[in-house]
Image (spheres, coloured by chain):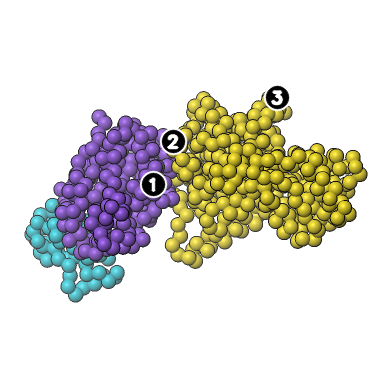
Amino acid sequence: MAEKVLMKGNEALAESAIRAGCRCFFGYPITPQTEVAAYMAKRMPQIGGTYLQAESEVAAINMVYGATSTGTRAMTSSSSPGISLKAEGISYLAGSDLPAVIINICRGGPGLGGIQPAQSDYNQATKGLAHGDFHILVLAPNCIQEMCDLVSDAFDLADTYRMPAMILGDGMLGQMMEPVALPEPHESKIEKPWAACGTEMKRPHNVINSLYIKPDELERIVMDRYARYRHIEENEVRYEEFMTEDADIVIVAYGASSRIARNAIMAARAEGIKVGMFRPITLWPFPKKALDRVADTARAFLTVELSMGQMIDDVKLAINCRRPVYLANRTGGMVITPNEILAKIREIKGETL
Amino acid sequence: MAKLTFNEDRCKGCGLCVSVCPKKILRLSENKFNKEGYTAVECIDMSQCIGCAMCATMCPDVVIRVEK
Amino acid sequence: MSIVFDRPKSLTDVPLHYCPGCTHGIIHRLVAETIDELGIEGKTIGIAPVGCSVFAYNYFNCDMIEAAHGRAPAVATGAKRANPDRILFTYQGDGDLAAIGTAETVHAATRGENITVIFVNNAIYGMTGGQMAPTTLPGQVTQTTPYGRDPQIAGYPVRICEMLSALDGVALAQRVAVDSVPHIRDAKKAIRRAFENQINKRGFSIVEVISSCPTNWGMEPVKALEWLRENMLPYYPLGVYKSKE
């Protein structure tokens, strides 16, 4: 185990990306993720990589598209309004079967919204990122160590499945400091025979493209991609359970809200209410089967979200509405407190148990 | 002495080559169609060709090979 | 007898999808001839646009990347930064480069991004059936300027070479045409220079090629080139607008 160092979430994530072989970073300043760009601007020249401040989020994601088309590990980071601008490029990455890592340090919306932590981009990340039939991998860390570990995994998963992967964090995780054990620098062994990096006159030309004029061809390509998605749903689901075995009420929360929920669980248990937590780490693929198993024993669910309730729909679908699903939430950059969650737990106890 | 070779089935009958030929020896065939249905270019007197390649330079479909 | 003119090797041996008399084919060939002459096919990566030349990725034997509409200079930037020893060119039309991709074009140029841009200006959106382009001439009738482009309503055309020549990062901004054999020969020289600049790490080079669109202009191919000479060349004078030695 490497020695632990105290680092800010955004910077730890950036360092971990470099250690995972990220050699190109294209960004644009936006609060609360700018530390990622600033860190990359400092570190990339030291390792012979590229940091480039793009003229826009649109240009940044297309620079990622260009770099990853040649087989180079590339990343961009932004916050909510910037991710909306990157949507076009992410659709093209998905449509061209290109790996890439995209960081969203989510803030309140819609529109310019605010700059405080939020989780209101859940639906955007997992369902409606851009035009067309496609998914991207969405990983949601809840501590700085996980920010490091998941960004490293995101590069491997993206290369393995040839698709974009997103780290969905929030301003709280990005800005806070914790001790982390940084991963050792590692080289990827994943080969990229598809890369458009120059033929060297040794092979036919490679073409990176998402255009299929013949509808039967496009349908086949999309269906093949969805077969890959099914494989991912079977094999790459990640989640963490906390005191769910005997829980009557199971909180479902990810990222920053899962940290707060943990405090509420301990307080509820002290009052004799059996509460546990199911924490999805992959938001896509969502851990549907595992959550459905929890519904065999739990009597009610409570999603804790820093939004008007977006993941709650996935929870209801996963358990086929077999149990009541409640919501404890704040939005707009307001952070929910353990007491607010505890109040909701007491309310559920009164209604359901 | 020069020779033109036409990749006839690639010709779209646009006539740009005809318009630049200094010897006026190219024309679009009047009753012969290529497999795409275009009236392709033909040379009416190869003996007059000087191999200047102006036709090939002007051709948007790389139909013409020139030897000299 | 020896061959004095033949298909360049870096052009794939497939029929081009362009309309009869469309000059895209000539420009493709000039790019391919340049790649052959410089012996760089194996290290060249081309970026195709959205528009009539969207299928350019099928026509060059070098590796090709299809970009989103207007984003080719950003895609080329990413590919070039990741692979400084590769030769990157973009091939873009007027809607792609001068309307939806203006920001990407201007910023790649001002950064002095060491890439080669082939900009085909035929004053119209071809692929979508003949709508007004940023380069459509005042008075020119298109599907979306049915009474002729009125600058009071639709604004004035954009002159890209003139505009980019003001930027420090630009190594070459040259406007050429493909309406005649002498002009095509000049165009070839300009394209070759734009690639040589990149090999010599001089920075951003753009060659604007004044081109025709017989189908959407509603003219016979030969007539379209006459119209180009009479109408486009006075508005878009040929020449070198910027050249860093």
**According to the rendering, which colour does chain C have?**
purple
Looking at the picture, tell me which residue is in the foreground, C72 or A115.
Answer: A115
Badge 1 marks a residue whose secondary structure is: loop
Rendered position, C225 above or below A113: below
Classify mark 2: residues with Cα within 10 Å, few (<14), some (14-19) or many (20+): many
Residue at the disc numbered 2: C81
Classify mark 1: residues with Cα within 10 Å, few (<14), some (14-19) or many (20+): many
Q: Residue at (38%, 38%) from the top-left corner?
A: C107
Chain of the residue on which disc 1 is drawn: C
Badge 2 marks a residue whose secondary structure is: helix
Residue at the disc numbered 3: A3
Q: Are marks 2 and 3 on the same chain?
A: no
**According to the rendering, which colour does chain B have?**
cyan
Q: Are marks 2 and 1 on the same chain?
A: yes
Q: Are marks 1 and 3 on the same chain?
A: no
Q: Amino acid at mark 1?
A: Gly
Quadrant of the snapshot with the N terminus of chain A = top right
Badge 3 marks a residue whose secondary structure is: loop
